[in-house]
Structure formats: C-alpha cells, structure tokens
Image: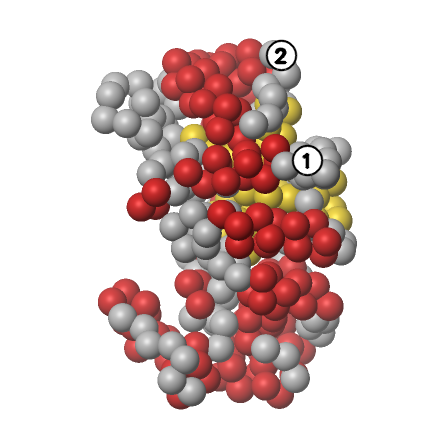
Amino acid sequence: MKYTHLGRSGLSVSRLCLGTMNFGPQTGEAASHAIMDAAHEHGINYFDTANVYGGSLGRGATEEILGNWFGSGGERRERTVLATKLYGDMTDRPNEGKLSALNIRRALDASLKRLKTDYVDIYQFHHVDRETPWDEIWQAIETAVAQGKILYAGSSNFAGWHIATAQEAARKRNFTGLVSEQSIYNLLTRDVELEVIPAARANGLGLIPWSPLHGGLLGGVLRKERDGKRRLEGRAAEALATHRDAIEAYEDLAAELGHEPGDVGLAWLLHQPAVTAPIIGPRTGEQLDAAVRALDVELDADTLDRLDKIFPGRKPAPENYAW
C-alpha cells in the first residue's frame, strides 16, 4: 500500500479510502466486518463514514457496525484513520442537523458513542451550512479539539468559495481549519476542476473523490450489459445513453491497455495531483480486491491525454470560460 499526507497535515493515509455507506443496507454486519479486516490486510488505514448512513436500518446504523468492529479488539481502532461526517437531520426535531454549535456537540457525542471510540481523526461537514456563521462553527470545532474528541476538520460537497471563506475565518482565529474536501470527481464528472480543486490546493486541502467510477458507469458497464450481468434503470440508464460513445471508447482503451475499466478509472484519479485518496465503497470482498488493483496501474502521458480526449475536463476558472 502507498501512503500520503492528508492535505497539508502531517497525517499519513492510504491512497485508497474505504467508504462504508453500503455497510448495513447493502452488506450485512458480518460481511462488513470481513471487508474492513481485508482492507487492513491490504494496508488501507483510511475509513470514511457518516452519521446519517444506515439506509433502511435507520440513520446511525453504519456507525454502529464500525463501532462493533472496533469493539472486537485486535487494535482495529488504533490501526484506523477514522473519518465521519455530520450535517443531515438525524431526527425531525429542531437542532438535530446542520452545523450549529449545539448540533456539532450533540452529533459528535452521538457518533462517538455509536463508533465506540473516544475520538474521531477527521470530523467532516457533509454539506455547507449557509445559515450558521463560521465563527460559531470554528468555535465549536476548537472546543472539540481541545477536549480531544477530534483531531482534524474536513468538508464535503463545498464550492471553491466555501473553502476559501472557511479557511479565511479559521486563519483569523489562528486555527488550522479544513485539511480535506470530499467531492464527486471522476472521468465523467470533472466540474471540480473549475474552482474546487484550485481552492483546495491553494488552501492545503487534500481532495477525496467520491463516486470515483460514477456509480459503476466507468466500471465496465457495457461489457456487463452485453454479458447480461447488469441492467441499468432510471438515471443510470439515462446517463449511459448520453455517454455511451465515450464509455465505449473508454472500455476499448482499457482493453487495449490490458486492464479492467474500473482499474483505469481509479488509476486516473490517483494520477491527479490534487487527489489524496478516492473513496471506494465495496459491497463485497471481491470488489475491494478489484479496487486495490488500481494502485499498480501506471498511465503514461499519452494514455492520460487519450482519456482527456474521451472525457474532456475543465481548465481552472476563469481560463475555462475567459481569455
């Protein structure tokens, strides 16, 4: 396994981040525990979750699955860089969501209880809160840091100017601020190249892409469709219809390289200078093993250029739309 620092921090994390959103609603607890054990065996030390994950089992269920795994011993917690998130409403009562100082205190304590740990390595804002001032947010986070309940703060789904505003408010308080940003980023969805990536790099944040294979569209979907192994419906089917020619060219390129399409999609992200670790969300151990293969895929400049021609990216703003 390869490791790198998370943004400008001194924290070392694996180049792949284990996403746990499927744990519970898609993957049972025993199988989830087996996947986490296998992730450690592969050297993956960076795990991501959120207080709202749990699907049909109820919000908080995924954190409880992780907590039971940590509670089974074997230095599982000590070997894990743990990231969780808050923002979404946990109940229909007031102050049970977003980023008020009250909810930060309550949500953090509730997550710690479910996770069976006394601290979280990275506490992330799942969405920007347009109604709570940054001074209030940072004061609450500073308190949690002083209490030893969290070590770092991160963001998710922020715009570039949100990152800049958050960091400026933190600097005025002589506080570290954000060390990471989670955004959707893959060959098909490259909007973050406009302003989010430049803002993250300028402010020392590591980029953590979610949906690195765009819901499976970059994972060999056409071949699976031909083999009768997958049938898309709804938005996924519409997206495939829109991008079919590009995806066909992409799968042909992967075959030419002798790699699985999903390996190429993940490897492309790992070749992007702003990216710390894509979030992989395996439902099975086999899917985890497949994701790890991408770490050994080297893409030369010609291949990267061909991928850019198939899936055109963005220049940083304002060059993308001005002279």
Task: Name the residue that disc number 2 marks.
Answer: 146
Question: Closer to the camera, 170 or 212?
Answer: 212
Image quarter of residue 260: bottom right
Task: Give the label, 1 or 2, closer to the camera.
Answer: 1
Q: Residue at x 46, y 84 (%)?
A: 223
| Amino acid residing under circle 2 | Ala
Question: Which SS class for mark 1?
Answer: loop
**What residue lies at 40% left-to-right and 88% top-to-bottom?**
226
Quadrant, the N terminus: bottom right
- What amino acid type is highlighted by mark number 1? Gly
Q: Where is residue 211 in the image (x, y as percent from the top left)?
A: 47, 57
Q: Say if residue 263 shows up in the picture.
A: yes
Answer with left or right where residue 254 lies relative to residue 218.
right
Taking 24 as reference, is 218 above or below it? below
Q: Which image quadrant for residue 54?
A: top left
Q: Distance between the residues labelled 1 and 2?
A: 27 Å
Task: Work out whether mark 1 precedes mark 2 in sequence or the reverse, and give the earlier one.
Answer: 1
Q: Give SS at disc 2.
A: helix
Residue 292 at x, y percent in the picture: 66, 63
Point out which mark residue 73 bears: 1
Asked if 294 appears above or below 118 in the picture, the reply is: below
Q: Residue 69 location, x and y as percent?
A: 59, 39
Vertical order, 171 against 303 (above or below): above
Where's residue 25, x and y in %? 38, 50
Q: Residue at x 39, y 19 (%)?
A: 103
